[in-house]
Amino acid sequence: MTLNIIKLLFGSKNDRELKRMRKLVKKINALEESIKGLEDTALKEKTQEFRSRHQNGETLDALLPEAFAVCREASSRVMGMRHYDVQLIGGIALHEGRIAEMRTGEGKTLMATLAVYLNAIPGNGSHLVTVNDYLARRDAEWMRPLYEALGLTVGVIASMQPQDEKREAYNSDITYGTNNEFGFDYLRDNMVLRKEDRMQRPLTFAVVDEVDSILIDEARTPLIISGAAEDSSELYRVMNLLTPTLRPVADSDGERNEKIQFQKVLLEGQEKPCSITAALTEADKANKDLVIADASAKPPVCRLAEKGHFMLDEKGRQIELTEDGHELVEQWLVKNKLMKENDSLYSAGNLNLLHHVHTSLKAHKLYHNDVEYIVQDSQVLLIDEHTGRTMPGRRLSEGLHQAIEAKEGLAIQNESQTLASTTFQNYFRLYKKLSGMTGTADTEAVEFRQIYGLDVVVIPTNKPIARQDLNDLVFLTIDEKYDAIVKQVQELQSKNVPILVGTASVESSEEVSRRFKAAGVRHEVLNAKQHDREADIIAQAGRPGAITVATNMAGRGTDIKLGGSWEADVEKLDNPTQAQIDELKAQWKERNEQVKANGGLHIVGTERHESRRIDNQLRGRAGRQGDPGVSRFYLSLEDSLMRIFASDRVRNMMSALGMEKGEAIEAKMVSRAIEKAQRKVEGRNFDFRKQLLEYDDVANDQRQVIYTQRNDLLEMDSIEDAITGMREEVMNDIISNHIPPQSLAEQWDVSGLEEVIKVDFGVDLPIAQWLEDDKKLYEEPLREKIIAAMDEFYQQKCERLGGVMRGLEKQLMLHVLDTLWKEHLQSMDQLRQGIGLRAYAQKNPKQEYKREAFELFQELLNSLKHDVARVLFKVEPMTEEQMHMMEAQRRMEAEAAMRNQQLKHEDASALTAPQAPESEAPPLQQPLQRAAPKVGRNDPCPCGSGKKYKACHGKLA
């Protein structure tokens, strides 16, 4: 109540921000007349003037009004498009590092040019991030004349682009590209062997288009560069034969059976009354026993006891074997000689088999053809659930993709080993300033603020929204819902109204298409199987009477214009004359007026998505720039969202209303129940993403340490001093292991020390003889003598090898660092997969993960020092030519590994293992700052060990 009063008096935070920004807009508008008076050359020279002023200390904030006015004037002259005031507000929000929520069709692409231009003035590069290569190329070419008129260069990065071309694009003032390519190039830059091979400059400013899609929907998708691992394809095929023999526990994901109450219950040993038997479904009778849970209750409570082989939890996307399932699987594995007699599926040697069983079950029960993936050209292509697009080159991790290939009878590709990885969350937080734009961000404002520190500013529309969003219609069954949709579409088509039918999967889009064909309804289908015709279908989707059935439209990046697209009609003509173009424009104008008179584009949603944001994106396809439009969702209790999350409450509500077959309910109470279910799913998905980030933050701290040290190595001409310090430290550790500090001579293991030095370093030191010859040779003098002898041996080797040794030290250290980091990533993956089980020991999995990850990292650093020292001592002379050949070979191998890049979906459910009951959760980690300050040698190490940086991870510097 108090908050509402404060809002009435002072306005919301968004209102106050808009009021502040409108003052800046007035300043920009006041400069418009003076800027208009400039010649084209003078307008172009303004950019260089801004750069000089910035170098002399003037801030970008101070330059903003004049720079925005210059950019708007250039756009008016070159593009024929003048930025609206609301686009100026959006540009200000982007420059300030915020997310601008601007409705579909309001001109986000043009709005972004303002902030991108201003932040390109310092000369450090501005990045504009899009969701696919098509949009990156389209927007770059579309806006290139504007930027070039202002004296700026524009580059586009794409997959499989030649390195020189890509490096030139990164060195441009403004670079367009996809989130995938920016992230992959960051990983590639941290795998190069020469500093000249790096692509990216320091990450200073980025505008992320469709920011909700990239930073939220893609947040659970790590970027992974991987190499081939061992072949286990035969095991996937064998497990694929086992899975069909396993029977699910009926209705295992529901909660209803645990709450069923019967009026009549007889105690065990007595005959079951007919009323109880009638209450059981046929599946229940086959798979479950009725047992009394509480005989003293009034009425007594019964529950159904499971008799299947596995429990299927669609809500949590988890599968667990029951006791019966364990027995059957173990018998089958023994029979097929994959496991020994009387052995347990949970013994250490069989955990790999258990993992394959679970993976195969998930492939069969949780991943469905034409829903989560399609099979095309003998390949499993994943479908983006948020956009409906296929994602070529992206594979599921942890063997799940191979299990799906086995299920579909396709060639099984080898599993891969991670060479480098990061998440979009951690990559984009590396930018000094990050901003974004989208049509729907406000529903995820809390997540943007908590994870990325980004505030959402809702930009007002240039014209009032004229679209009508009608209440949902809810039916009992899917058939009733589809019948109503077909009837409504036929009625609208007879009135020449364009209709967009939105579906949640390829499967449902093809089901709607099948029913339309049966009813004689002309239509087009746009899903992952018809992506090559996407532009043509969208261009004509606004024509009178056009019906388009499409999977989720998020991220399509193309507006549906009422009356269709006259530009698409012009493209079909060979060398069109101006008269033909004018005629096509006139025809479009007539169609446009006709569609507006009929109420504009009608949106028909066939089911609600898990996220309200995706529903809003579908609605947003209608009503652009003040156009009329109508949207309505048709739902049934058999829809996935309703069945899993909301059906009980809504079903009881509908039963109480006494609904008949084919009848729909339209009530705010039902809409609120559906929205509550969506909020529940959104909250659950947010928890998954936050949990993934908390785990990856541990790896990210280590990643930053390794990548910083690696870049330092590349920048150094010689690492002689670092190698000397490393050698000395390794020798001190080895000596301390055999001659403990402040110990008696009788406790020394001299022969063991001689053996280690000889085997590991190839140096034969007569330490026992030294002690025999000099009785006064105590611990410290002996330590110094051993280290001096090792240094002398190493210096003699350096003299023999000449200048080759200095280059070899650097290449060898990079090689050892990369090898150990690759092995470390594999160990971290294995640690994360099983860490949830620590909850059963009343330990906090996150805290245990941090502790063990730190121990693994310490092992990596110790191994690095020892391995580098050991190899350098034993290295054989190599000519300069041989060294260049070795370097070229390593570069070829690295490039081959990079070509094997893969994007993998993180199975976030693996991170949601049971938490320890009644245990208090640790405080949430604060998100990392996007630009970490340089760590001084005497500062505390950022890894959290409590040691000084120079005594911990700074040793490599």
Image (tube, grey):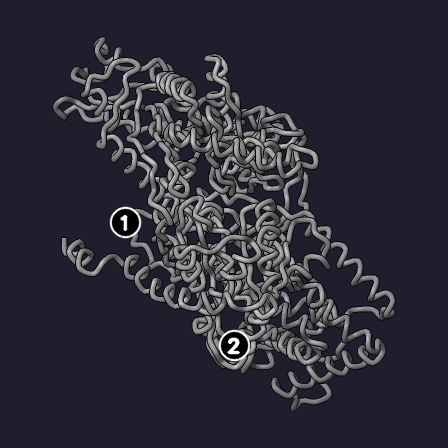
Q: Which numbered disc, 1 or 2, marks the residue that appears first in the sequence?
A: 2
Q: Which residue, given by chain and number where applicable, does mark 2 sit on? A: 54
| Closest to the observer, 188 or 431 | 431
Q: Residue at x 73, y 88 (%)?
A: 773
Q: CA distance from mark 1 to mark 2?
A: 57 Å
Q: Which mark is residue 29?
A: none
- In the image, taking residue 612 as reference, residue 410 lies left or right, namely right
Density class for disc 1 (Cα within 10 Å; few <14, some 14-19, many ≥20) is: few
Mark 1 lies on residue: 918
Element marked by disc 2? helix
Q: Is residue 748 visible?
A: no
Q: Is residue 927 visible?
A: yes
Q: Residue furthest bottom?
A: 776
Residue 88 falls left or right of residue 529: left
Q: Residue at 62% of width from left, 61% of height from top?
A: 148
**Residue at point 20%, 61% (across, down):** 10
